[in-house]
Image: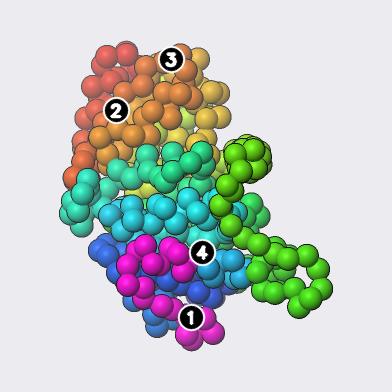
């Protein structure tokens, strides 16, 4: 298929259709409303169903119902709307139901504004609802990567019977780039034996619920979930490194901030500063490996975020105090520039003496 020029929100929607998603329940909120509008037109063409719910709360519970029948289903929102979905996401995890949930992040807290941000990191990686749980989180940095990760999100969701979050900032949702779509699913999707489509009198009853009134039964369910989370942490870590082999300063950034940071790194390299990049692609499970591998030789890490400093906590946990971890961030929808990041690199280089 030839490349086409599309907006990020629309790329997510089209990639979901190519992944076999037939059902979408959502509610428009800037800066992801184009995703909802695209699905309203596209899903009926693909033999699916689009429904604009009366609220984000209604939408996530519709996702719960559809997923229980074994279909591939998606919803999307932006920060305040995503917050409203948290109870339903917790239900999905507890009932072990697969779904893909998109969060195109905007500035907060509260209603905030409609500018891009990454300040939902805690919410998506630490289990934003109640209970002991995690959801896999994928953070693309380009529109072509959106295509790939949207399709992977559906695969991961089905593989582990869990909701998966695709998180991007408002800039990623609004930018336009050429992308190429491929149909990865030439055969029928696997049959879900647990789906509540009726046994027709043949076989055991199928019950989907997250309610366990007996404490011992609920504990056993939590133990089962923790085993699943451990398996996800082993198998689903994704990250990318850039010029880290000889780096004495390593920047860590995700999403579009990582692209800006890469330009600053190239400029710093021209000045003789040995600096590289670790880009987490899975925000949970967080990729500790590149930090464990480098922490005894790197002089300093720098976490660059569109937040007041949230991912830095996971970086510090991975580094385990073996090297200093610094932070540079912008909040409220302000995007860090290449010059901002380059200036911070120069400051750190002078402090830790890494000039070549």
Q: Which of label 3 and label 1 is nearer to you?
A: 1
Would you say residue 208 is visible in this rendering? yes
Residue at which label 4 appears:
64
Q: Element under label 3?
A: loop
Is residue 29 shown left or right of residue 292?
A: left
Mark 1 or mark 3, which is nearer the start of the sequence?
A: 1
Tag 3: Cα neighbours inside 10 Å, few (<14), some, or many (≥20)?
few
- For marks 4 and 3, the one nearer the N-term is 4
Question: What colour-coding does the image apply?
Answer: rainbow
Residue at image position (50%, 74%) is 23
Please tell me which of labels 2 and 1 falls first in the chain.
1
Structural distance between the alpha carbons of marks 2 and 1? 44 Å
Q: 55 and 259: which one is in front? A: 55
Q: How far apart are marks 1 and 4 (CA)?
A: 15 Å
Q: Give the range drawn in magenta.
A: 43-63
What residue is rendered at 33% in x and 45% in y? 120
Q: Which of marks 4 and 2 is in front?
A: 4
Residue beneath the point at 27% across and 48% down: 117
Mark in front: 4 vs 3 = 4
Name the element at disc 1.
strand
Tell me the distance, in whole angstroms, between the alpha carbons under discs 4 and 3: 42 Å
Q: Residue 327 carries which label?
A: 2
Q: Name the residue under label 1.
A: 49
* Mark 3 lies on residue: 321
Image quarter for residue 143?
bottom left
Above or below, comparing residue 313 to residue 103 in the picture: above
């Amino acid at each position: 298929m030839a490349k086409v020029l599309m907006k990020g929100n629309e790329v997510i929607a089209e990639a979901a259709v190519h992944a076999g998603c037939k059902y979408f329940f959502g509610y428009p909120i800037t800066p992801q409303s184009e995703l909802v509008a695209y699905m309203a037109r596209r899903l009926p063409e693909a033999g699916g169903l689009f429904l604009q719910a009366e609220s984000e709360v209604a939408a996530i519970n519709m996702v719960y119902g559809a997923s229980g029948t074994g279909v591939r289903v998606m919803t999307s929102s932006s920060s305040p709307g995503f917050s409203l979905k948290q109870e339903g996401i917790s239900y999905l995890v507890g009932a072990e139901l697969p779904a893909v949930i998109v969060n195109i992040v905007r500035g907060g807290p509260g209603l905030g504004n409609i500018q891009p941000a990454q300040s939902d990191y805690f919410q998506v990686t630490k289990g934003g609802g109640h209970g002991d749980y995690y959801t896999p989180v994928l953070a693309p940095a380009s529109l072509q990567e959106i295509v790939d990760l949207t399709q992977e999100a559906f695969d991961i969701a089905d593989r582990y019977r869990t909701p998966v979050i695709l998180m991007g900032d408002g800039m990623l949702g609004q930018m336009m780039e050429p992308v190429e779509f491929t149909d990865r699913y030439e055969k029928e999707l696997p049959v879900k034996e647990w789906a509540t489509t009726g046994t027709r009198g043949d076989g055991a009853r199928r019950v989907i619920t997250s309610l366990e009134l007996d404490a011992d039964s609920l504990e056993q369910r939590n133990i089962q979930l923790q085993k699943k989370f451990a398996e996800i942490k082993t198998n689903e870590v994704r990250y990318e490194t850039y010029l880290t082999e000889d780096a004495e300063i390593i920047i860590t950034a995700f999403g579009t901030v990582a692209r800006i940071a890469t330009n600053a790194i190239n400029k710093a390299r021209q000045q003789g500063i040995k600096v590289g990049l670790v880009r987490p692609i899975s925000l949970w499970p967080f990729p500790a490996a590149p930090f464990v591998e480098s922490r005894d030789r790197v002089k300093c890490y720098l976490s660059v975020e569109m937040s007041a400093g949230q991912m830095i906590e996971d970086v510090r946990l991975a580094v385990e105090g073996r090297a200093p971890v610094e932070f540079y961030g912008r909040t409220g929808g302000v995007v860090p520039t290449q010059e901002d990041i380059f200036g911070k690199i120069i400051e750190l280089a002078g402090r830790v003496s890494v000039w070549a």
